Image: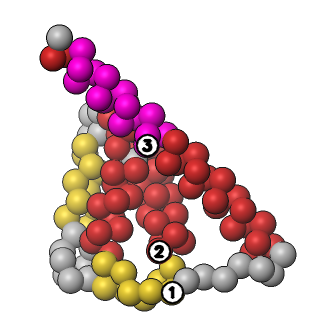
Amino acid sequence: MAKDQARVAQFARMIVSAGTRMRDLITNLLDANAIEEGRFTSKVERLDLRELVEESAEHNRPASTRKEINIQVCASGGLWAKADRGATLQILDNLISNALKYSPPKTTIQIHTPS
């Protein structure tokens, strides 16, 4: 019974993750359209890059699980930047997604940030 509950919880997390990624994809398409029409405004704010790297790694967890690739985040704390949160996450998601796409199964991807 506990094994069934664990599988249901795992599938629920995957569904939520897929839904979030679909929402983000639609948002990105709308942003691209706004950029083309000259209507895009970025919201620059102070961001903790370690937090964003960890969030992006979590977004990519389902893909890494499918390929049995371990994602290791080796990011130091206190690394701040002034940037647009959504755009920065999109860049990180692209980088990690490409690393997963071109890495062989059963390997490890390490994400490092400057100290």
SS class, disc 2: helix
Residue at 37 percent of width and 31 percent of height: 12
Colour basis: secondary structure
Query: Which segment is the magenta one?
Result: 4-18
Q: Nearer the viewer, residue 3 or 80?
A: 3
Classify residue 46 as left or right of residue 18.
left
In the rendered structure, which amino acid carries the disc numbered 1?
Val
Residue that lies at the very extreme toward the top in this rendered image: 1
The residue singled out by tag 2 in the image is 85
The residue singled out by tag 1 in the image is 44
Residue at 75 percent of width and 75 percent of height: 35
Q: Residues within 10 Å of mark 1 (few under 14, many from 20)?
A: few
* Quarter placement of the N terminus: top left
Residue at 22 percent of width and 69 percent of height: 75
- The tag on residue 17 is 3
CB under 8 Å between discs 2 and 3: no
Q: Residues within 10 Å of mark 2 (few under 14, many from 20)?
A: some
Residue 71 position within the rendered picture, expressed as x and y whole percent measured from the top left: 27, 49
In the rendered structure, which amino acid carries the disc numbered 3?
Ser
Marks 2 and 3 sit apart, C-alpha to C-alpha, by 18 Å
